[in-house]
């Protein structure tokens, strides 16, 4: 099959609901999209073309954190605005772009290009909440575009969890970075996060409320959601049922044990984990 051209991707993005001037948070699986001429860079160029001069593209481009105390090797892995992200080819194509702006936050280093990129990225610092950019995007009327069915979450669930005040025992991890006074300092993770396997439970609710615009870009199915709408829905759901985002995996330590409102028992998690290991060995 012929690789997708930039023109083809532009056409698909317009059909998927992307408009000029949009403030857009993007999550991409390049594998789902299929081969594009020039790869992730071409998709980025196509997106920038469609949103135009007044638009802005934002992506998660978070960086690795390490167990505390930092090992000798990890101590030297300094987080900077040019650090590569584990978030995949598209995020890294954005980081390589000459017009990119990057979060000042030492770990949750979002990347952005476009009209509002500078203001958003420079205001996100070590003193801000890890997911502050998402909350900001929701309040500014942004949309979230998922390219690929394997891409999980619509960008607002973490914000909803934090804003609902749900708390978790945080596993101590961090990274060294250079603070505003030019000193190398450790930054420790100070947000709860959550289990991605549970976030998919919200999808039928978004669908029921008509919040999803579906489309196709390349070979990938897409869905486009207004971030303020998904955030409102998630907040309302979590207010009534704070455990709604827990996954159903009986071996998931995160959901079963770590939250203040987790109701699992350590013994059960151990039991099901041993069972899962035995099943794997038996199936070999
Ligand atoms: Zn889980």
Image: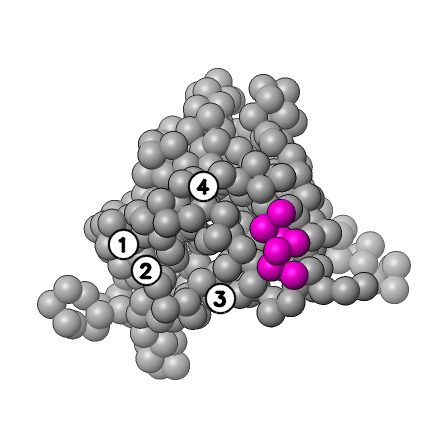
Q: Is residue 164 visible?
A: yes
The quarter of the displayed image where residue 122 is located: bottom left
Residue displayed at 61% across by 56% down: 7
Q: CA distance from mark 3 to mark 2?
A: 13 Å
Q: Earlier in the sequence, mark 3 or mark 1?
A: 3
- Residue 101, numbered label: 2
- Residue 93, numbered label: 3
Residue 100 position (above or below residue 244): below
Q: How many marks?
A: 4
Q: Does the stretch in magenta take in 10?
A: yes
Q: Which residues are magenta?
A: 5-11
Residues marked 3 and 2 touching at CB (< 8 Å): no
Name the element at disc 4. loop
Q: CA distance from mark 2 to mark 1?
A: 6 Å
- Residue 20, numbered label: 4
On the image, numbered disc 1 is attached to which residue?
Answer: 118
Residue 16 placement, left or right of 72: right
Residue displayed at 50% across by 59% down: 45
């Amino acid at each position: 099959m012929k690789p997708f051209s930039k023109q083809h991707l532009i056409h698909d993005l317009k059909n998927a609901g992307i408009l000029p001037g949009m403030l857009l948070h993007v999550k991409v699986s390049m594998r789902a999209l299929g081969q594009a001429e020039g790869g992730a860079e071409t998709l980025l160029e196509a997106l920038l073309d469609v949103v135009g001069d007044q638009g802005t593209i934002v992506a998660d481009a978070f960086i690795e954190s390490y167990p505390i105390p930092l090992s000798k090797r990890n101590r030297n892995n300094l987080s900077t605005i040019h650090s590569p992200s584990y978030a995949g080819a598209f995020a890294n194509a954005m980081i390589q772009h000459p017009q990119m702006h990057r979060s000042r936050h030492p770990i949750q280093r979002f990347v952005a290009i476009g009209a509002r990129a500078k203001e958003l990225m420079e205001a996100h610092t070590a003193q801000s909440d890890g997911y502050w950019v998402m909350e900001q995007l929701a309040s500014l009327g942004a949309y979230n575009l998922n390219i690929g069915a394997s891409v999980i979450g619509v960008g607002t669930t973490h914000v909803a969890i934090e804003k609902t005040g749900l708390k978790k025992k945080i596993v101590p991890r961090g990274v060294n970075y250079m603070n505003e006074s030019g000193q190398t300092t450790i930054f420790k993770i100070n947000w709860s996060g959550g289990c991605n396997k549970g976030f998919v439970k919200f999808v039928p609710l978004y669908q029921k409320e008509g919040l999803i615009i579906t489309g196709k870009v390349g070979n990938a199915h897409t869905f486009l959601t207004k971030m303020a709408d998904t955030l409102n829905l998630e907040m309302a759901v979590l207010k009534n049922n704070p455990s709604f985002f827990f996954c159903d995996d009986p071996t998931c330590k995160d959901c079963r044990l770590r939250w203040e409102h987790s109701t699992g028992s350590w013994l059960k998690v151990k039991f099901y984990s041993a069972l899962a290991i035995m099943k794997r060995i038996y199936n070999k």
